[in-house]
Image (cartoon, grey):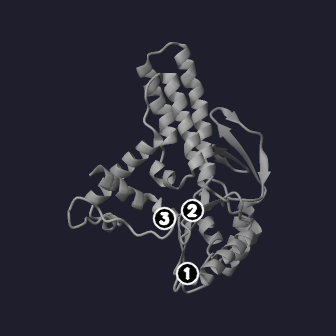
Amino acid sequence: MYPRSLRVGSMTLDYDNDSDFGFALNKSRSSQHMHLLNTIIPSLLTTKLGDLGLHTSLCDWISNFLTDRPQSVRVGNCASSTLTLSTGAPQDCVLSPLLYSLYTYDCTATSSSNTIVKFADDTVVVGLISDNDERAYLEEIKHLENWCQENNLLLNDLSWSRHTSSLAKKARQRLYHLRRLRDFRLPSKVLRNFYTCTVESILTGNITVWFGNSTKQDRQALQRLVHSAERITHSELPDLQTTYYKQCQTKARKIVKDPTHPNNRLFSLLRSGRRFRSLKAKTERLKRSFFPQAIRALNQGN
């Protein structure tokens, strides 16, 4: 149950990304994430383990395991100075995911019309809205926020604007290298291949998920990077809107051809047999999500 590179009396962890604890609020289709493994309070965890009926000696052992543990981070041959930690659970430790689940066992729905589904490090809150009465659902969200505060967990206010800003920053860094290659007078074909591999792959990663609901300003900011790359490579590059529709078409065709896919039923042909039936959407956010956009892209391609 010990992590990689663990020594008795101290701990050295290989560099890894933080695990996220996610909440997707079904009514608004938004998602929020929090760092969980780094914020577990051992004393609170011990109390919960006792409430679950675990033996006192086992609870004390786990508390001792999590508190006052010397830890350092190693990247290659370099290691940081040792830091003593008394919060969180060590990553790459077999025991940590189990402690994670036990720490969040009391995150449950308070209303029969709501359901909280947890899988690995993701949690989804689903609410049944009847007669446009959202009070039970909104109270559930408020209860979830209070639970997070009581358990030392912070909800991150994620938005696609922050995501696109992060993409733009990464793409600008790679455009610098593209300019350096241009200064070395490399052929335009080589420059374009470099752009496709290092810049376009960043801008179009999971584009079917976020591009539809991104703002006009965010799209323009990303498209300006494409125009900059066109001037550097002296060639015409595909715009993001075109790439988005092509990827929507590709993914949608795979779903249509797979009768076992859970969302295959969303793609139903009209009587003509040539076009797909559009999905009804009352909100602009739903209209711009993947499935309505994918059906629109398929119909445009027919």
The amino acid type, in three-letter code, at marker 2 is Asp
Q: How far is mark 2 from mark 3, CA to CA?
A: 25 Å
Label 1 SS:
strand
- Mark 2 or mark 1: whose residue is earlier in sequence: 1
Residue shown at 20% from the left, 62% from the top: 273
Q: Picture coordinates of residue 184 (x, y %)?
A: 53, 13
Q: Secondary structure at mark 2?
A: loop
Q: Secondary structure at mark 3?
A: helix
Q: Which residue is mark 3?
A: 286
**First along the sequence among labels 3 and 1:** 1
**Rendered location of residue 188, percent (x, y):** 44, 19
**Callout 3–callout 1 Cβ contact below 8 Å:** no
Instruction: Quickly name the residue at label 2.
Output: 121
Residue position for label 1: 114
Q: Is residue 95 above or below residue 47?
A: above
- Determine crowd level at label 1: few under 14, some 14-19, many 20+ residues with C-alpha closer than 10 A: some
